[in-house]
Image (spheres, rainbow, N blue to C red):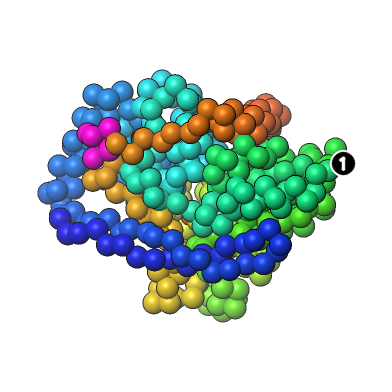
Amino acid sequence: MNQEVTKWVDFIQPTRDGQAEIAQAKAKVPASLSAEEEARVITELKQLLKEEDAVLVAHYYTDPRIQALAEETGGCVADSLEMARFGRDAKEQTLVVAGVRFMGETAKILSPEKRVLMADLEATCSLDLGCPEEEFSQFCDQYPDRTVVVYANTSAKVKARADWVVTSAIGLDIVRELHRAGEKIIWGPDKHLGHYIQQETGADMILWQGSCIVHDEFKADSLALFRQSHPDAMVLAHPESPASVLAQADIIGSTSQLIKAAEASNSTRFIVATDRGIFYKMQQAVPGKELLIAPTAGESATCKSCAMCPWMAMNSLAKLRDVLEQGINEIKVEEEIRLGAVKSLNRMLDFSEKMRLNVQASGDLADDQALFQHVGPA
Ligand code: SF4
């Protein structure tokens, strides 16, 4: 096994007065394993999951080997909404969350009686980092008549400050409902997702100016050229991408919605604007079809310009084995903060349950367009 390497990643740090600064955060590239070491670690992990009454809850952007292990051992591979729901409903008493810190916190907020472990407590997210609770709260205080809606990619403290938490899978529907009810909104932290929702719903929204370092790197000019050389390809984009990229998308949606859209489509080739970790599950859904990553500034540009989240990449099989073996890296959330955050999270989960009852998809994208209003032509 070689050594873990630390690197520094730039991200946008917005301020409450609408300005933005460049800040830096640490990311670690895990040590790689030989084939024999990897096989041994997987065997040990499977055994530990059983012994520790634990289940692996993995995000689509993690290493495909982690996703495969989660599937094989009865865990889940999902977007953050489904991860939250799966963790809450799991019978196991230990949740091993493979993702970034806010996902582990969300699991703990919803399941305080369970032990939540993470591969690396420093695996973070530029949206979470770029939205410190004190600054964001002061920003909200300037508009006391507005409903505060925050994306799931935030700290427990920011969730506790909010009225609603949403994920990209359900944000559009929730804001649409709030807008219908006449509510004005403060949105944080992702400016691109906020702008997209604002456009689609017509809601009155004031946006915090955070962004995802991975999706921010997709380039509209290069995408236009790429589409010319692949005219038959359908463009699937995550709404954390810039508006100029979304304007070229055939389908805009969360990770799970993009996978469903690829499955429902007759196209045989897709250009995908989201973290390339999604290819593991998307390729399972559309075997034999071609998946191409949307162009970024180029792999040689910066470490964040490779359509791979440097913090998601901090999850490794060896680290997951170590945390289960040693019982380390447990997520803790102060009870007062948890009680605040759980209210806004449960509002989203309750809303989502009601939608599930009302929405029964046929699986045919053309027929389901009216149901999946958040997964439509751009
Ligand atoms: S891909 Fe972007 S939004 Fe997702 S965890 Fe990484 S930095 Fe955060």
Q: Residue at x 36, y 55 (%)?
A: 313
| Residue 274 seen | no
Closest to the observer: 229 or 87? 87
Residue at 51% from the left image edge and 36% from the top image edge: 106
Residue 120 seen in this snapshot = yes
Quarter-of-image position of residue 350? top right
Amino acid type of the residue that numbered disc 1 sits on in the rendered structure:
Gly
Residue 338: which quarter of the image? Answer: top right
Q: Which quarter of the figure has residue 119?
A: top left
Asked whether, in this view, residue 283 is left or right of residue 256, the answer is left
Q: In the displayed structure, does residue 232 sit left or right of residue 314?
A: right
Residue 8 sits inside the magenta stretch: no
Q: Give the number of callouts.
A: 1
Quadrant containing the N terminus in the rendered view: bottom left
Task: Name the residue located 56 percent from the left edge and 73 percent from the top edge.
Answer: 219
- What residue did someone put label 1 on? 182
Q: Quadrant of the C terminus?
A: bottom right
Q: Looking at the magenta stretch, what is its main secondary structure?
A: helix
Q: Dot 1: what SS?
A: loop
Image coordinates of residue 202 in percent, x first then y, are: 82, 53
Q: Which residues are magenta?
A: 321-327
* Residue 296, percent from left and from top: 50, 72
